[in-house]
Image: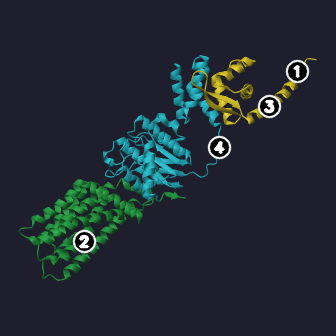
């Protein structure tokens, strides 16, 4: 689940670890510990869903920037569609008449 | 625990799990700098975080079909006079596997290795080998009046390697073990104990044998060389060698895939 | 063949680097030679070859002992037992022949009325027998000290024992008396040479079988080990 949220956070553009965490927190998922976030990124990278490269930031030392791969975009689109279906089904069932 | 301590501990934990720590540590450091929070809160204990990272990078590897074991020792027993040193010892080592053999003094570790190499006969039991052996004895195994290069040529010729190729291969392997410069022309008896033992280890690996039998090969190594030694073992393992290391350093057991304990109470 | 030559080359390098043995190899026969030069010059021919025999077999003893820890590793590296001992023998023979040259020249210049071709034969046979003698002793005895004592005893007995006694015939250098006599005494017949050569040939064969046998047993393929 977290992996999909990370993909979603990257759909708004490439970013580095700390900023991804901030985006997730701002979207209401609560604080995500670094101990969970980075392993998720490494996992997504191994599966080829995100790509990364090291770049010098505007200030301070180099950062590792992540972005979605084509495969990652496709996966996210599929998951998002599945999720929408799932949510509408659940909403329909839980609707109080 | 300061941030620096925590990062150093993480680097060490990753290193011993054979993951290059540079990127993971740099990323964690950047995060800690950005967030300004203590590492234990953000990432937890270094060891646990290292384990999670390693799992994420490697994934849960599907069990490989490893084929028949390279070395299979079955039911090995050995007595010297009335003293029984080995009773019904079994061991299988596959390609790409490193086994540590442990046990106290006199528990028969070296004897077991010599039996596996076919240098000693057991009273009972069989050893089945698939492939060539490289053997590193605990001491000896080098000729005092020959230089390291001459050793490479001599052992290489046995394996059918040409003179220049043997020397090149030997020197490369020696350099990986932090070999002191300019020692290629000194007779072995003028080398320090640790350097001679490195020569011994290089000779065992010369000519790419399939099975490596190493009897406490790091005696006299300083700490850096000791780590280099394990790097070498892992390289061999990744290259598909079957490796048996006799060791007494119990703290290092998680460096091997399997442990065979020859202490008397553990023998059946 | 290449393997034998590599073993020979390395054994040769080892011997050449043992300065002490090398010095002994030259000095001892020289001492033997001059010990009899004045009162019995004809004996000095035999003494010098005995000296060469003693020092060369000692060099072989050291070579054999030194090889003990190395041999199992070399065997596992692909050498056969015979390649190992043949390589060492070749090296020792080469050293022996080289050492003989100056001593032959010494005899040639220093002593007249000697059958020089017989001296050459005597030296060649001594070298041939000494190398496997030293290797055999090194394979039979645990340490260099014991080996040295045995070789010393052999040479002493060779000098002291009456060569006509049957027991003297089992000594490895008995032939040197026979061929030496032929070299020095002009009325000695070729029977001396025949007997000497026969004795040297038998000694050589026995020692070679001993060295080969002991080495093959020590480095044998163990029954418990099977390879696929």
Q: Quote the CA–CA distance across marks 4 and 1.
A: 44 Å
Q: Quote the CA–CA distance across marks 2 and 3.
A: 92 Å
Q: Which mark is residue C124?
A: 2
> Which residue is labeled 1 in the image?
A94
Q: Which mark is residue B63?
A: 4
**Few, some or many C-alpha atoms within 10 Å of disc 2 (few <14, some 14-19, many ≥20)?**
some
Expressed as whole percent of the image width and height from the top left, the position of residue B25 reads 56, 27
Q: Residue at x 25, y 65 (%)?
A: C98
Q: Secondary structure at mark 1?
A: helix
Expressed as whole percent of the image width and height from the top left, the position of residue A93 reads 89, 23
The colour assigned to chain C within the rendered structure: green
- Which one is in front, B146 or C168? B146
**Few, some or many C-alpha atoms within 10 Å of disc 1 (few <14, some 14-19, many ≥20)?**
few
Left/right of residue C100 with respect to residue C80 in the rendered view: left
Q: Quote the CA–CA distance across marks 4 and 3.
A: 32 Å
1 vs 3, front mark: 3
Expressed as whole percent of the image width and height from the top left, the position of residue C52 reads 20, 65
Question: Label 3 marks which chain's residue?
Answer: A
Question: Label 1 marks which chain's residue?
Answer: A
Q: Quadrant of the N terminus of chain C?
A: bottom left
Question: Label 4 marks which chain's residue?
Answer: B
The colour assigned to chain B within the rendered structure: cyan
The single residue placed furthest to the left in the displayed view is C39
1 and 3 marks on the same chain: yes
- Check if mark 4's residue and mark 3's residue have beta carbons within 8 Å: no
Left/right of residue C129 with respect to residue C215 in the rendered view: left
């Amino acid at each position: 689940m977290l992996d999909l949220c990370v993909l979603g956070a990257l759909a708004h553009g490439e970013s580095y670890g700390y900023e991804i965490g901030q985006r997730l927190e701002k979207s209401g998922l609560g604080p995500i510990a670094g101990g969970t976030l980075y392993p998720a990124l490494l996992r997504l990278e191994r599966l080829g869903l995100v790509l990364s490269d090291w770049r010098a930031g505007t200030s301070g030392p180099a950062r590792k920037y992540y972005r979605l791969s084509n495969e990652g975009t496709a996966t996210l689109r599929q998951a998002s569609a599945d999720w929408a279906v799932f949510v509408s089904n659940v909403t329909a069932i839980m609707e109080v008449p | 625990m300061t941030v620096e301590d925590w990062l150093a501990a993480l680097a060490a934990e990753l290193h011993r799990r054979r993951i290059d720590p540079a990127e993971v540590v740099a990323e964690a450091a950047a995060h800690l700098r950005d967030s300004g929070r203590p590492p234990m809160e953000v990432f937890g204990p270094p060891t646990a975080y290292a384990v999670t990272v390693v799992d994420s990078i490697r994934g849960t590897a599907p069990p490989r079909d490893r084929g028949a074991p390279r070395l299979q020792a079955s039911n090995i027993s050995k007595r010297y006079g009335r003293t029984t040193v080995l009773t019904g010892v079994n061991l299988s080592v596959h390609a790409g596997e490193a086994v540590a053999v442990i046990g106290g003094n006199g528990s028969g570790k070296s004897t077991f290795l010599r039996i596996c190499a076919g240098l000693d006969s057991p009273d009972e039991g069989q050893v089945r080998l698939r492939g060539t052996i490289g053997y590193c004895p605990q001491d000896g195994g080098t000729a005092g009046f020959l230089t390291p290069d001459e050793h490479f040529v001599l052992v290489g010729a046995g394996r059918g390697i040409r003179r220049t190729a043997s020397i090149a291969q030997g020197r490369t392997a020696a350099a990986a073990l932090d070999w002191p410069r300019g020692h290629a022309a000194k007779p072995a008896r003028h080398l320090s104990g640790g350097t001679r033992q490195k020569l011994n280890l290089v000779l065992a690996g010369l000519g790419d044998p399939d099975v490596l039998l190493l009897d406490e090969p790091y005696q006299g190594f300083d700490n850096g060389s000791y780590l280099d030694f394990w790097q070498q073992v892992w390289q061999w393992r990744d290259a598909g060698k079957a490796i048996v290391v006799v060791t007494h350093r119990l703290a290092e057991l998680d460096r091997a895939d399997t442990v065979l304990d020859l202490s008397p109470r553990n023998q059946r | 063949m290449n393997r034998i030559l590599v073993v020979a080359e390395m054994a040769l390098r080892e011997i050449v680097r043992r300065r002490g043995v090398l010095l002994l190899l030259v000095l001892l026969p020289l001492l033997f030679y001059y010990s009899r030069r004045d009162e019995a010059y004809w004996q000095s021919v035999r003494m010098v070859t005995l000296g060469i025999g003693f020092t060369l077999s000692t060099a072989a003893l050291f070579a054999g002992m030194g090889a003990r820890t190395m041999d199992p590793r070399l065997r596992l590296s692909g050498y056969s037992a015979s390649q190992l001992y043949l390589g060492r023998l070749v090296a020792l023979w080469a050293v022996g022949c080289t050492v003989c040259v100056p001593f032959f020249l010494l005899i040639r210049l220093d002593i007249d009325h000697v059958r020089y071709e017989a001296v050459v034969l005597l030296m060649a046979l001594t070298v041939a027998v000494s190398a496997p003698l030293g290797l055999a002793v090194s394979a039979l005895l645990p340490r260099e000290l014991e080996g040295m004592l045995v070789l010393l005893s052999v040479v002493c007995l060779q000098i002291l024992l009456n060569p006509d006694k049957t027991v003297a015939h089992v000594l490895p250098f008995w032939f040197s008396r026979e061929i030496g006599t032929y070299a020095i005494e002009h009325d000695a017949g070729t029977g001396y040479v025949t007997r000497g050569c026969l004795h040297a040939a038998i000694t050589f064969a026995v020692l070679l079988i001993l060295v080969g046998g002991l080495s093959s047993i020590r480095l044998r393929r163990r029954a418990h080990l099977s390879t696929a």
